[in-house]
């Protein structure tokens, strides 16, 4: 598996370490990635490799077989991409929890300020609906997704709040 970014994590000994580039399941396990995510990725990767190896087999030689091969390949690659994305999301969230400082006071100041939901969406990528729900109290700031809280906190800091 090749990671799209670099991620920091705490090793079992409590030391800050970095994971990036091409990684093995043992590297992922050391970075505290749950076994289920690693297993899901490995199974999806094995499925893609198996289907690729069957491309010229007799079962896929017919026109219907070629169509089935293409649909199987697309489905397997979707599963692989989803598993890869799950691992990256886990590593990013873990990094934010361990090393990112989320300043909820700044988030609240941002939400109570005159900065429009459109402006916040433009700079953070968080939907106006979600921002509106936070501004009007429909959603609680304390129950916000970690990534959104971190993004809003960083945006508020950039505005000098």
Image: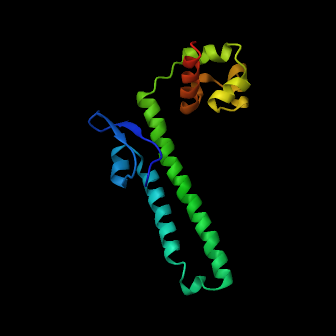
Residue 132 in sight in this render: no
Would you place residue 126 above or below residue 102 in this image? below
Count the marks.
Answer: 0
Residue 40 spot, x, y in % from top left: 48, 57
Q: How is the image coloured?
A: rainbow
Image quarter hosting the C terminus: top right
Would you place residue 55 above or below residue 88 in this image? below
* Nearest the eye: 52 or 143: 52
Residue 5 spot, x, y in % from top left: 46, 42
Residue 69's image quarter? bottom right
Instruction: Give the side of residue 68 with respect to residue 32, left or right.
Output: right
Would you place residue 128 above or below residue 103 in this image? below
Q: Residue at x 54, y 17 (%)?
A: 157
Residue 59 in sight in this render: yes
Q: Residue at x 71, y 13 (%)?
A: 114
Residue 19's image quarter? top left
Image quarter hosting the N terminus: bottom left
Residue 11 spot, x, y in % from top left: 31, 38
Q: Residue at x 56, y 64 (%)?
A: 76
Residue 16's image quarter? top left
Q: Residue at x 53, y 49 (%)?
A: 85
Residue 143 spot, x, y in % from top left: 59, 27
Instruction: Give the side of residue 133 with respect to residue 40, left or right.
Output: right
């Amino acid at each position: 598996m090749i990671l799209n970014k670099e991620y920091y994590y705490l090793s079992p000994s409590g030391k800050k370490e970095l994971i990036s580039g091409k990684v093995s399941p043992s590297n992922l396990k050391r970075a505290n990635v749950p076994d289920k995510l690693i297993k899901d990725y490995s199974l999806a990767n094995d499925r893609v490799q198996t289907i690729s190896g069957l491309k010229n087999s007799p079962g896929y030689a017919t026109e219907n077989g070629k169509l089935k091969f293409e649909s199987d390949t697309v489905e397997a690659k979707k599963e692989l991409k989803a598993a890869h994305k799950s691992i990256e999301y886990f590593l990013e969230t873990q990094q934010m929890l361990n090393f990112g400082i989320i300043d909820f006071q700044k988030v609240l100041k941002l939400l109570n300020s005159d900065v429009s939901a459109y402006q916040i969406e433009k700079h953070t990528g968080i939907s106006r609906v979600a921002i509106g729900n936070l501004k009007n109290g429909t959603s609680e700031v304390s129950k916000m997704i970690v990534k959104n809280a971190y993004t809003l906190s960083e945006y508020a800091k950039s505005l000098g709040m």
